[in-house]
Image: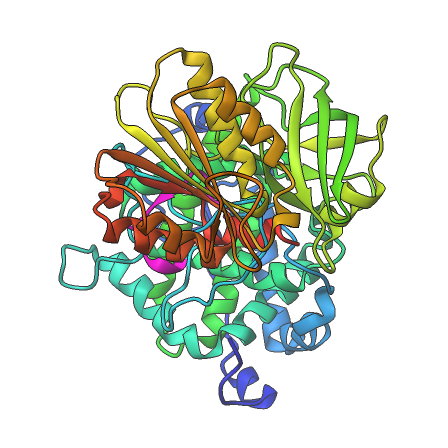
Amino acid sequence: MRSAGGDEHDDRGRMPSRPVSSIRPVGTAAERERAPGHTDDQAPRGTLDHIPGRTAEEMRGRQRQHAHEHQRGGGHEGAGRWGGDAAGAGAGAFSPFPPTHPPTSTSTSSTPATVSGPAQAGTVAPSAGVAPPSAGAPPSPTGAAPSVGSAGPGSGDSADVMIVRRTLDEIEPVADKVTSYFYALLFVRHPDLRALFPAAMDAQRDRLFKALLTSVRNVDDTAYLTEYLSHLGRGHRKYGTRPEHYPAVGECLLSALARYAPTWGPDAEGAWVRAYTKISQVMIDAAAEDESVAPAWWQAEVVSHELRTPDIAVVTVRPDQPYPFLAGQYTSVETPWWPRVWRHYSFAAAPRSDGLLSFHVKAVPAGWVSNAMVHRARPGDVIRLGPPSGSMTVDHTTDNGLLCLGGGTGIAPIKALIEDVAERGHRRPMEVFYGARSDHDLYDLDTMLRLEHRHPWLSVRTVVATGRAGGTRNGLSGQLPDAVRQYGPWWEYDAYLSGPPGMIRNGVDALVGVGIPSDRIRHDSVEELVAAGD
């Protein structure tokens, strides 16, 4: 999003004359229970409420300081120093603050711009005028993901939600400036928080801010928001995020909105305080609950590193403690060479009795983590893993067949699903289409053929985009989604897709076109996929 209109002098004229109200949740559920006079249904009304670790006098002092900065134009100077690329340069870093990646896989009932898988590289442009999710929304019990911001004014929205969405519409043309100013305030007012972010974060700027706005846009969808943000709260523990960090982010967010939203006033301020309070409290409570049962991250030693092609490696690691996950899920990986830079990779095998975990990693241009994993990691090196995520998992309560499309290293979670079905001992037809640019890129073909030979219920077809199909008796030439249309019928199958964004989008269209209900098509989200490609 490019900035639209205005210059820095004009922007200063929109500087609020006083600081925004303090953000209150914050504290775990247990801390709130101990607070005198607390009730869970209390809604902050933009007053100076208690924030754990800060006294009321400290908060009033902070507001006086912020007001003084505004009066002397200090925030304006900070924006010039920290805005734009000054915050760092690099690709797709993740943040310790809400929300930067999806909890689970999405189904095709979400918008076309929210589909793909976590192990490939690509980009997807957001729809104009809508703050896109940082990742796909979690599925409902039927597997269908809620549509972000699908409800509009007049459809039962609360007054707060209508005010929030009006603010989002107002700042959309100048989102670049709002984002830069938000980070200026955050890092100038709270320099200690800079250490929680990766050194390079140009792409991170847009991802974090849009994710914050997306969460607020859905603040009235309690079921969706609770599931989505609970996952994020648990996952953000690995960044070192603490409850006391949330008010800092919220205050800077509201200050940025107050500067650029033309109709900002007490009503808007109150609505945003209440919305952000709700969002952050869900994340804080989920993190506190998770802290008692799981570590924030796992240390994992590389025990095997097999280079399959010049740019694809199969990396196997041994975590330092039990790592529970399901076949079809993925995790976040941090290498010792790029601290605080995390990327997502799917598990390439179902859970094993020896506890080892495997990943298929493709090095991409300028990909910090992927190049380190492919070209630098060796047995004995230690990486860090975040918690498992994703719901592209097999529903073992049905007898439906499974139709799986795996493009490139997207074959990794498909392989894990095959092993999962085999271990259950329940024979179900499973059709796998393994796509690649050429025969040379079918790096895991031997493994897939061995699985096919071992299990009579499994069929593997290769699809190459260029050159003659070879390697298997079922080899096909062309695009993966087109190949699927040649077979079938598929209406009694559950579908799973993993691969580059374009393949996922076209695959979804093809599967819906051949009669598979959208709530039975599972894949991971576009933003996760893009981040994994860095």
In the rendered structure, the answer to whether residue 257 lies left or right of residue 311 reads left
Would residue 27 be visible to someone looking at this image? no
Residue beneath the point at 67% across and 19% down: 356
Q: Nearer the viewer, residue 368 or 464?
A: 464
Say whether residue 370 is left or right of residue 345.
right
Residue at left offset 66%, top offset 54%: 534
Q: What percent of the width, then of the height, locates residue 204?
A: 61, 58
Q: Nearer the viewer, residue 289 or 432?
A: 432
Magenta-span inclusion, residue 111: yes
Residue 227 screen position, x and y as percent: 37, 36
Give above or below for 42 relative to 185: above
Q: Quadrant of residue 323?
A: top right
Q: Over which residues does the magenta segment extend? A: 99-113
Q: How is the image coloured?
A: rainbow
Q: Which residue corresponds to the image point at 28% horizontal and 41% vertical from the top-left?
A: 222
In the image, residue 186 above or below residue 16: above
Residue nearest the observer in this picture, 147 or 36:
147
Is residue 362 visible in the rendered image? The answer is yes
**Residue 293, above or below 342:** above
Decide whether the magenta segment is chiefly helix, strand or loop. loop
Q: Is residue 174 left or right of residue 489?
A: right
Residue 310 vs residue 265: left or right?
A: right
Percent from the top left, x then y, of residue 97? 57, 47
Magenta region includes residue 282? no
Query: In x, y percent, where is residue 49?
Result: 45, 44
Marks counted in the figure total 0
